[in-house]
Amino acid sequence: MSALASAPRPAPGPTLRWRIAVLVSAAIAISYLDRQTLPVAIKAIERDIPVSNQQFSLLQTAFLITYAFMYAAGGRLLDVLGTRRGFTIIMVFWSLACMSHGLATSFVLLAACRLLLGAGEGGGFPAATRAVAEWFPTKERSTAMGIMNAGTAVGMVVAPPLIALLLSFTSWRSIFVVTGALGLAWTVWWRRDYFPPQEHAKLGDEERAQLRSVLQARPAGQKELGWLPLLRFRETWGLVTAKFLSDAAWYFYLFWLPKYLYDARGFDIKTVGTFAWIPPAAAGVGCLVGGWFSSHLLQRQLSLDRARKLALGASAFVMPLILFVPSAPVAWAIALFSLAYFGQQSWSTLVMILPADIFPKSAVGAVAGLVGFGGAMGGVVFGQAVGYLLDHGFGYGIVFALAGSLHVVAFATICLAIPHIQPLEGARA
């Protein structure tokens, strides 16, 4: 507080925190580009390393297992190291892990590379959540998280056409080097531009006043809570369970969309590059619309609980339409995928901001880590089920029917476990 009050700084206007939102969004975009490189390039990889449906599921499981544990540990790591230093370490590690895929010569080595990539990327969203908690007041948080979460869509939109283009003149191994190098370049930008608000040298008077109110709302000296104390709260279990359910569907869409288009619709790499970016583009719109809608409701004087739950419910109840994908013509199937991506990322933006709405700043990273752990484990369980069902002749119909129901159940879980979304006073002791 004294640093904010005393430092003689220039006054660029109240936009610095939004530039920081864009900076973190770029990191999230890179993470989704890195994790999508293998699913989009899988047909080229299979020419050198044969991969069955069950093995493809295992590759995604390898990523998600370490992603889940690092998501939880990354939240605590960021609570200890701070957002700036912690995200630097995380980004460098996952960028090098991404590059290592280009050295793989067998399925086992590919799986090892996925383990390393998941271990690195697991800290990305806890870092984003902490940055929001540090820089944004309650009425702006969902909009800020929408901007950050839109990075997922940017990475997914860029991946199919970029990888198809690169594969037209280079090997699949080189692609992982290119995508990994982008992360290292981002690290330089991060180190130059990101500081906690108490330490930032470019705060104008208006923004300094805004940030002072944020800091006053989060009293200094709060006792940090470990994972076991946090598990005493049903709000924690509600968020973890809801994320487990909704991300089970999300990771299926994320990792299996290119393979579904290859296997069930007869697409080649060029056609996937032409069309597979459309659902992720809708996801980006969903990020922004979900965050904006909830912030808009708050500005119209709705309670925090109603603003968040109205937006969450609207997002969840478009998801069952995905069950019509297997029987729809290909153009309608892409449209249904686009609607599902829109609803999922609107939902995800709002769920990710709930830890900052409910828990004190000292616990936000740890709660976000637990929630992300639950989501990744949902992806592991459902991903293995998908591989088994497809390899045993059940087809995509049953898979889409299951996936389409999960967000609705997740919304019911949040309503039951968190009757009122509000700051949790018991967690501040």
Image (cartoon, rainbow, N blue to C red):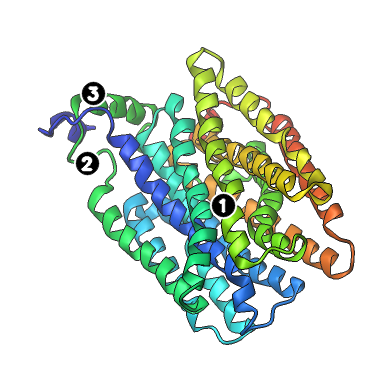
Considering every residue shown, the one lying at the far left of the view is 8
Which residue is drawn at the image coordinates 27% and 55% (left, top)? 189
Which residue is at a point 57% across and 72% down the rendered structure image?
115
Which sits earlier in the primary sequence, circle 1 or circle 3? 3
Crowding at label 1, few (<14), some or many (≥20) Cα neighbours within 10 Å?
many
Q: Quadrant of residue 352?
A: top right
Q: Real-space Cα distance between discs 1 and 3?
A: 39 Å
Do callouts 1 and 2 mark residues in contact (Cβ within 8 Å)?
A: no
> For the residue carrying disc 2, how many other residues have a C-alpha within 10 Å: few (<14), some (14-19), or many (20+)?
some
Report the amino acid beneath label 1.
Trp
Identify which amino acid the numbered label 2 is placed on: His
Q: Secondary structure at mark 3?
A: helix
Q: Mark 2 sits on what residue?
A: 200
Q: Are marks 1 and 3 in contact (CB under 8 Å)?
A: no
Q: Relative to 400, is 359 above or below? A: above
Return the x and y of residue 415 as percentages of the image width and height: 71, 30
Q: Could you say which is closer to the camera, residue 424 or residue 19?
A: 19
Which one is in front, 77 or 60? 60
Circle 1 sits on which residue?
277
Q: Nearer the viewer, mark 1 or mark 3?
A: 1
Provide residue 31's location: percent of width, then percent of height. Answer: 47, 58
**Residue 39 versus residue 26 in the image, above or below:** below
Question: Mark 2 or 3 closer to N-term?
Answer: 2
Does residue 68 appear to the left or right of 428 in the view shown? right
Query: In the rendered structure, which amino acid carries the disc numbered 3?
Result: Glu
**Marks 1/2: CA distance?**
37 Å
Q: Which residue is the site of mark 3? A: 206
Element at label 1: loop
Classify mark 2: helix, strand or loop: loop
